[in-house]
C-alpha cells in the first residue's frame, strides 16, 4: 500500500483555527481553566488600552512549567482528547491555549517558572509563519523586542505563568476606542462571574479572579435560599450514570424581588436567555441556559417568557465529555439518549412550576400546584380537541353565592359571565406580554387597600353566609388564597357585619 504524508500548511491552518467562534470572554475563560488545572489560587487578567499596541495579560500563581512542559503546552493538539484525565482537569483537546489566543491576537507569548527555577518563555507570532527557513511551525524563544517589561511580574514570583496577547487584530478593529475596551471588560467580568461562580463563592473560595485589579464577584443563577423561590429541589442523581447530578430551581417572580435583585437575577443574557439547564464540569460552568434539545412532539422547547424563571443545574464528570459531546469551545452539550427521559421529566416538572409562578406573578406555587383549604380559582382552563377555552368557575364561593341570591336576575348574570368568557382579549394579552416582557397587571397590583377590601369583604361574607364557615375558618381560607395571601393584614381585620 502506498502511503503519502500530508501535513497541513502551517499558515493556512493557524489562520483557519482563528475562526472557531471564540468571543473574548470565552477565550479568556479557557485560559483561566488552564490556570485552575495548574492549581492556581489567584488569576489576574489585565486589558490594556494603547491603541494598536493594546495588550492582554493573564498572570497566575499556579505550579508553572519547565521548558519541556511549556514546549508541549505550546504545541497544537499536545494531548490526545481520548486519553484519561485527572478528575480535576478542565481541559480535553490540547488546543485551548492556542486557539483561544489566536482567536483574539496574532502574537502569543507564554512565560513560566516552576518552583523557583529559571523563567522559560516561548512565543508564537502568526506574522512570522513561513518566514523562517527550515521551520514551517516556528516557535520562538523569549518575548518580542520591547515586550520584556510585560513579563516582569514573573521575576518576583516563586512559581506561576504569564500569558501575553499582542497584536490584538480581532479586538482593536477600525473605530475601536478606549470606551469600547471598558465595555469589553464589563462583559468579561459578567462572564467570569457566571462561569466560575462556584469557585469564587463561599467563605473560603478556591479561586480569586482579578480583572484590571478589581476582584470578580460571583453571580448566583439560582438565588439560593431566597424566601420567594417556588422550587429548590434536593440534588438528584441521574440513574445509569456515574457522577451526574441535577437540582431544579424556580426563581421568584419579579414582583417579589427588589429592583437590584431583579437586575442581578436576570444574568448576563437576560431572563429569557438564562432559562434552562446549566451544565457544569468540575464546578466550572460550560453551558448557561437552553433546554438541551428536549421538547415535546418532536419539537424542542424554545426559550420563552412563560418559563423564564426555570433554571436547572446539571453536573457531569470530565470522563463524560465524549458522551455529552462537549466541543472545543466548551459551549455545547448534548445529553446521551439513554438519559433524556429522566432529564425530560425533571425539566417538565420545573417548567410547569415556573409557568404557574409566572402566570400568577408573585404567587409562590407549591410543587403539586394546589393549595389545601384555599378558595377555588375564579378561572378554569379547559383543553379539548377544539382548542383551549377559559371559563369563570360557577362554583367559586363568591359567584355561587351571588347566583343563589340573584332571583330573577340570575339569567342575566349568567349571560354576562358567558359574554366575558367569550370576549377575553387573549391575543391582545399575549401581544402585550410579548412586547412588555411581563405579564399584565393582575392580583390587585398597584391597587389601594380600600379597593382590595371591597372584594375581600364580599368574599368573606360569601364564605360565612353562603358556605357556613365560621369567621376564623373564612379568614384562614382567604389567607391561603391568591391574591389575598399577599394581604394578610387586611384578611386578619375582617369581621362579620351586623346584617349577617
Image (cartoon, rainbow, N blue to C red):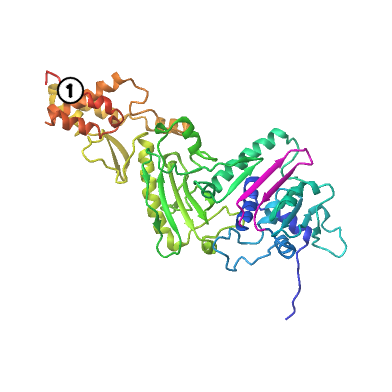
Viewer-nearest residue: 66 or 313: 66
Residue at (45, 53) in percent of width and height: 294
Viewer-nearest residue: 433 or 497: 497
Q: Is residue 33 left or right of residue 310?
A: right
Report if residue 260 lies within the magenta region: no
- The quadrant the N terminus occupies is bottom right
Q: Can I make out residue 300 in this image?
A: no
- The quadrant the C terminus occupies is top left
Across the whole image, how many numbered discs are drawn on residues?
1
Viewer-nearest residue: 245 or 334: 245
Check the image and name the residue furthest to the bottom: 1
Q: Is residue 131 left or right of residue 369?
A: right
What x and y, as percent, mark residue 79?
Answer: 65, 65
> SS class of the residue under badge 1?
loop
What x and y, as percent, mark residue 293?
Answer: 48, 53
The residue carrying pointer 1 sits among few (fewer than 14), some (14 to 19) or many (20 or more) residues within 10 Å by Cα, namely: few
Report if residue 52 lies within the magenta region: yes
Residue at (55, 54) in percent of width and height: 332
What x and y, as percent, mark residue 380?
Answer: 27, 37
Label 1, on which residue? 495
For the record, the magenta segment spans 39-63
Residue at (54, 63) in percent of width and height: 87
Q: Is residue 451 left or right of residue 130?
A: left
Amino acid at each position: 500500500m502506498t502511503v503519502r504524508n500530508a501535513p497541513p500548511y502551517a499558515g493556512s491552518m493557524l489562520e483557519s483555527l482563528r475562526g472557531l467562534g471564540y468571543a473574548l470572554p470565552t477565550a479568556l475563560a479557557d485560559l483561566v481553566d488552564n490556570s485552575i488545572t495548574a492549581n492556581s489560587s489567584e488569576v489576574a487578567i489585565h486589558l490594556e488600552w494603547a491603541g494598536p499596541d493594546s495588550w492582554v495579560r493573564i498572570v497566575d500563581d499556579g505550579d508553572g512549567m519547565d521548558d519541556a512542559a511549556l514546549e508541549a503546552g505550546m504545541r497544537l493538539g499536545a494531548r490526545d482528547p481520548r486519553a484519561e484525565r485527572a478528575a480535576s482537569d478542565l481541559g480535553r483537546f490540547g488546543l485551548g491555549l492556542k486557539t483561544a489566543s489566536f482567536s483574539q491576537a496574532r502574537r502569543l507569548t507564554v512565560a513560566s517558572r516552576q518552583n523557583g527555577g529559571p523563567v522559560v518563555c516561548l512565543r508564537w507570532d502568526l506574522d512570522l509563519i513561513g518566514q523562517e527557513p527550515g521551520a514551517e511551525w516556528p516557535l520562538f524563544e523569549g518575548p518580542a523586542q520591547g515586550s520584556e517589561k510585560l513579563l516582569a511580574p514573573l521575576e518576583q514570583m516563586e512559581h506561576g505563568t504569564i500569558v501575553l496577547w499582542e497584536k490584538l487584530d480581532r479586538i482593536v478593529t477600525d473605530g475601536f476606542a478606549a470606551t469600547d475596551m471598558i465595555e469589553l471588560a464589563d462583559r468579561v467580568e459578567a462572564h467570569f462571574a457566571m462561569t466560575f461562580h462556584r469557585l469564587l463563592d463561599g467563605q473560603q473560595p478556591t479561586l480569586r479572579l482579578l480583572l484590571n485589579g478589581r476582584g470578580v464577584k460571583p453571580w448566583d443563577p439560582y438565588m439560593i435560599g431566597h424566601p420567594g423561590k417556588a422550587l429548590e429541589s434536593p440534588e438528584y442523581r441521574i440513574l445509569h450514570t456515574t457522577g451526574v447530578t441535577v437540582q431544579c430551581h424556580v426563581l421568584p417572580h419579579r414582583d417579589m424581588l427588589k429592583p437590584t435583585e431583579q437586575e442581578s437575577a436576570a444574568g448576563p443574557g437576560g431572563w429569557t436567555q438564562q432559562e434552562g439547564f446549566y451544565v457544569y464540569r468540575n464546578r466550572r460552568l460550560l453551558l448557561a441556559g437552553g433546554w438541551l434539545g428536549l421538547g415535546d412532539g418532536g419539537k424542542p422547547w424554545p426559550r420563552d417568557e412563560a418559563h423564564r424563571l426555570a433554571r436547572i443545574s446539571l453536573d457531569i464528570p470530565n470522563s463524560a465529555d465524549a458522551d455529552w459531546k462537549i466541543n472545543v469551545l466548551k459551549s455545547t452539550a448534548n445529553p446521551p439518549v439513554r438519559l433524556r427521559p429522566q432529564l425530560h421529566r425533571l425539566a417538565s416538572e420545573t417548567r410547569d412550576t415556573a409557568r404557574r409562578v409566572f402566570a400568577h406573578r408573585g404567587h409562590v406555587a407549591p410543587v403539586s400546584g394546589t393549595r389545601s383549604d384555599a378558595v377555588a380559582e375564579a378561572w378554569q382552563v379547559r383543553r379539548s380537541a377544539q382548542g383551549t377555552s377559559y371559563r369563570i368557575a360557577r362554583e367559586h364561593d363568591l359567584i355561587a353565592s351571588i347566583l343563589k341570591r340573584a332571583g330573577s336576575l340570575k339569567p342575566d348574570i349568567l349571560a354576562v359571565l358567558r359574554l366575558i368568557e367569550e370576549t377575553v382579549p387573549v391575543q391582545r394579552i399575549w401581544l402585550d406580554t410579548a412586547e412588555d416582557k411581563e405579564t399584565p397587571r393582575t392580583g390587585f397590583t398597584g391597587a389601594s387597600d380600600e379597593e382590595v377590601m371591597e372584594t375581600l369583604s364580599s368574599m368573606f361574607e360569601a364564605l360565612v353566609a353562603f358556605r357556613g364557615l365560621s369567621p376564623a375558618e373564612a379568614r384562614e381560607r382567604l389567607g391561603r388564597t391568591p391574591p389575598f395571601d399577599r394581604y394578610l393584614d387586611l384578611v386578619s381585620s375582617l369581621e362579620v357585619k351586623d346584617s349577617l
